[in-house]
């Protein structure tokens, strides 16, 4: 498998590659890798858990969040499709 070149803006290339191998998007992988490089991997790993699970959100709330992230096709997506799109963004 050819090695991916994340470019000069990615500060932790090893973590970036691991996240991409797990199926995360380029944007999400770069965001996490750069946060880990800036603050340390263990600090970034402790984040999260403040917002309720997407399953507890209404469809309107999910569409609003999808709009913030510029997810295409959000207006016709069902709840489970919105959740999948948000998690894979």
Image (spheres, helix red, strand yellow):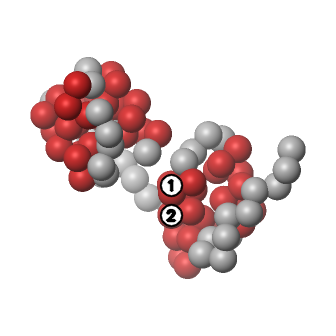
Quick check: can you spot residue 31? yes
Vertical order, 61 against 16 (above or below): above
In screen coordinates, is 28 left or right of 62? right
Q: How many numbered callouts?
A: 2
Residue 83 higher or lower than 64, as above or below: above
| Mark 1 burial class by Cα count in 10 Å: few <14, some 14-19, many 20+ | some
Residue at 57% x, 54% y is 26
Can the viewer see residue 79?
no
Using the image, tell me which numbered label, if any, was put on residue 61: none
User: Residue at left 57%, top 45%?
Assistant: 24
Q: Which sits in the foreground, 10 or 51? A: 10
* Disc 2 packing (10 Å; few <14; some 14–19; many ≥20): some
Residue 38, image x and y in percent? 55, 78
Alpha carbon of mark 1 to alpha carbon of mark 2: how far?
5 Å
Instruction: Pinpoint residue 72: horizontal percent, then vertical percent.
Output: 32, 39
Q: Secondary structure at mark 2?
A: helix
In the rendered view, does 30 fall on the left or right side of 15? Answer: left
- Identify the residue shown where x is 82% and y is 55%: 3
Horizontal side, residue 78 vs residue 44: left or right: left
Q: Which residue is mark 2?
A: 31
Q: Which residue is mark 1?
A: 28
Where disc 1 sits, the SS reads: helix
Q: Nearer the viewer, residue 86 or 77?
A: 77
Asked whether disc 1 touches disc 2, contact meaning CB atoms under 8 Å apart, the reply is yes
Front residue of 45/62: it is 62
């Amino acid at each position: 498998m050819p090695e991916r070149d994340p470019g000069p803006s990615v500060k932790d290339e090893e973590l970036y590659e691991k996240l991409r191998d797990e199926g995360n998007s380029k944007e999400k992988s770069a965001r996490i890798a750069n946060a880990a490089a800036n603050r340390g991997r263990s600090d970034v790993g402790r984040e999260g858990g403040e917002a309720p699970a997407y399953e507890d959100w209404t469809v309107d709330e999910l569409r609003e969040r999808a709009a913030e992230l510029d997810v295409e096709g959000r207006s016709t997506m069902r709840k489970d499709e919105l959740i999948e799109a948000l998690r894979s963004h």
